[in-house]
Amino acid sequence: MGKYNFDEQINRYNTSSLKWDFNLERGKQKDILPFWVADMDFKLPNEILNPLSKKLNEGIFGYSECSSNYYNAVSNWFNTHYGINVSKENIIVTPSVIFSICTLIRILTKENDSILISEPVYYPFKESITINNRKTIISNLVIENDKYVIDYKEFEKKIIDNNVKLYILCNPHNPVGRVWDKLELGKIIDICKRNDVFIISDEIHADFIYNKEFFSIGLFDYDKKVIVSAPTKTFNIPGLKISNTIIYDKTLYKKYKIELDKIGYSQQSFFGLYATIYAYSYGEEWLKELKEYIYNNIIYIEKYLKDKLPKIKLIKPEGTYLIWLDFKKYNLTDKKIDDLIINKAKLWFDSGLIFGESGSNYQRINVATSRILIDKMLDSLYKTFKDL
Ligand SMILES: Cc1ncc(COP(=O)(O)O)c(C=O)c1O
């Protein structure tokens, strides 16, 4: 028994929760359990909540700016967790990772330029490209020995054929759970170097790695790279709207600041700043136990499926708190699978298709929740699919 109780069930209805209340707003019944959007059903530990409550009780929430405490906390986290040096001069604070990706797209490319992504991948990548009037080029990941990998030949061909300017890397890769290893990243960088392609590396899931080493793109010698990251997945604070963009190139850093001025963004969220400082300073022990809890959920689900629903195949994640399930053995359409999951099993997953056509017949499940809900989910899944 650890110090923290991740089994505690917290009623999240009527908390303006996208994950829980949006469900109702869409006219769906309250009995549909949500396992979709990547936010966790766990409460922050007192080590972080207490100093944050103190800030709340001070009662003044004027304009706030990043203090040296903020930069030190971020820099220390990046150094101790990812082995990279970042300082105030490299860090730009924005409200979210997708905000930053959209901003970078506008700075680094022109309208109609081609931007590459590796599908299946977090769908807002494509949305960010499209909404900014750029062209999405897709290189599909391929499965080799139950593991998603990059087909480097095809990857480079797509870059050359489409004059690609920018690649958005997802590391760890949502939804397939890959944590790209050193060799793989080296190959990606070599190809991008050869073809003068800028890389945005989305490393928001980097604190959820299981039995593997995480290599940030910051460790590699390539000038044309930016890291987008945040404490929001790690500490479940996406509602506080904060993220960090790491820019090494001074000219790009300046351009980014000007772009922020152009859209009228200046000061940061008061609670976002303080939550980041407290989480990165006092959240280590909680995070360690949290990761164990989530990893145990993954192993538990893997065993359950093997024993009771062997037609559903789990692609075991090396990172993230999301699992990717293959329903191909049922020979059903995506529409039918979605329909069974929502209307019969009364569960809300993310349909694989939203991550790209190669996500057809897959479902993504967020397992950052209590074991009690995982049990309920598995039970419903069993009742729905056992005889199919
Ligand atoms: C890979 C990835 N990037 C970005 C985000 C969203 O980050 P933000 O809320 O800071 O835009 C998510 C959320 O699930 C994600 O999985």
Image (cartoon, rainbow, N blue to C red):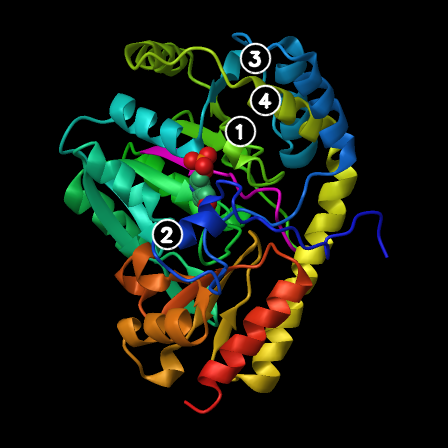
Q: Which residue is mark 1?
A: 240
What span is colored magenta in the figure? 198-210
Cα–Cα span, label 2 and label 4: 30 Å
| Residue 34 shows up from this direction | yes
What percent of the width, then of the height, locates residue 26? 34, 53
Q: CA distance from mark 4 to mark 1?
A: 6 Å
Instruction: Write down the residue under mark 2.
Output: 121
Mark 2 and mark 3: span between their CA atoms?
A: 31 Å
Mark 2 / mark 1, whichever is N-terminal: 2
Is there any visible trace of residue 164 in the rendered image? no
* Amino acid type of the residue that numbered disc 1 sits on in the rendered structure: Leu
Compute the Cα span from label 4 to label 3.
19 Å
- Could you tell me which residue is drawn at 66 percent across and 58 percent down? 370
The picture places residue 70, in percent across and down from the top left corner, at 63, 16
Residue named by callout 3: 88
Mark toward the start of the polypeptide (4 vs 1): 1
| Residue 339 colored in magenta in the image | no
- Name the front one of labels 4 and 3: 4
Quick check: marks 4 and 3 in contact, CB under 8 Å?
A: no
Of mark 2 and mark 4, the one earlier in the sequence is: 2
Label 2 neighbourhood size at 10 Å, few (<14), some (14-19), many (20+)?
many
Indicate the secondary structure of the residue bearing disc 2: loop
Q: Nearer the viewer, residue 341 or 182?
A: 341
Residue sitting nearer the eye, 103 or 11 = 11
Q: Residues within 10 Å of mark 1 (few under 14, many from 20)?
A: some
The chief SS type of the magenta part is: loop
